[in-house]
Amino acid sequence: MTYPPSVQKLIDAFSKLPGVGPRTAARYVFYLMNHDAAAADGLADAVSALKRRVKTCRLCFNVFESEKEICDVCASARRNNKLLCIVANETDLAAIEAVQTYDGLYFVLGGTMTGIKKENHKNLRFKELEQRVKNNHALKEVILGFNPTVDGQTTIMYLQRQLKPHNVKISRLGLGLPVGAELEYADEETLASAISGRK
Ligand SMILES: [Zn+2]
């Protein structure tokens, strides 16, 4: 079966999203076309605003939207700059921030390691992290805020080695997060106790 090129193009675009197969993608496209013109306009605007307005913070690599050079968390004098929590991605950062127990700074690594070969991980910000740790002279503790999954563990072990020479305390989230769990889906209480029970 063939769809008109513009329909197919949007199906292909949706299919690239995590967890969306071609059938779901096609359902989204026809829903937008047939039932909800306003949602289609909203989606188009939101997607184009992403590129135009959203910036990546040069310190933590989280996304933000303002005229400033760095994000509100990095710019805030109320955040504890002795603490740096390293997370895989923006959604993990948002999950930890939502709990409101953590008042330190962040660093978004850009993903987790799959296997130990370094050439598979060119997209991860190991170099930038190294710089960040080196340049923050107030830093006392780095928290490895990764999912208790195989990839999360691999990343934790790698970072423990990489950060060892920097003379900072390296901790990881405490128990309470079930093995295989994902931070962004953990309930706030669990996440809060994982942060405060770090070791
Ligand atoms: Zn920032």
Image (cartoon, rainbow, N blue to C red):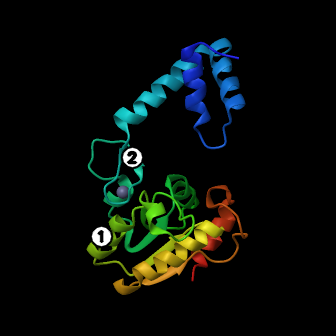
Q: Is mark 2 within 8 Å of ligand 1?
A: yes
Q: In the rendered view, does 65 fall on the left or right side of 9?
A: left
Residue 40 rendering spot, x and y as whole percentages = 56, 19
Q: Horizontal placement of 97 versus 177: left or right?
A: left
Q: Is residue 15 above or below residue 26?
A: below
Image quadrant in which you'd find residue 22: top right
**Residue 15, relative to residue 129: is it above or below?**
above
* Residue 103 seen anywhere in this rendered image of the structure: no
- Disc 1: which residue: 131
Q: Secondary structure at mark 2?
A: strand
In the image, 189: left or right of 134?
A: right
Dot 1 or dot 2, earlier in sequence: 2
Q: Can see residue 174?
A: yes
Task: Report if the CB atoms under discs 1 and 2 are less than 8 Å apart.
Answer: no
Res. 64 mark: 2
| Element on which disc 1 rests | helix
Camera-nearest residue between 105 and 167: 167
| Label annotation for residue 183 | none
Q: CA distance from mark 1 to mark 2?
A: 21 Å
Q: Amino acid at mark 2?
A: Phe
Point out the quarter of the image occupied by ligand 1: bottom left
Can you give x and y, in whole percent of width and height, for residue 150 in the image? 65, 69
Estimate the x, y position of residue 81 in percent, counting from the top left: 36, 71
Counting other residues with Cα less than 10 Å from the Cα at mark 1, is it few (<14), some (14-19), or many (20 or more)? few
**Measured from the top left, where is residue 67 in percent x and y?**
28, 41
Query: Residue sitting at 52 percent across and 23 percent down?
Result: 42
Q: Name the residue: 44% across, 76% down.
A: 142
Q: Nearer the viewer, residue 199 or 115?
A: 115
Q: Which residue sits at x=57%, y=37%?
A: 16
Mark 1 is on which residue type?
Gln
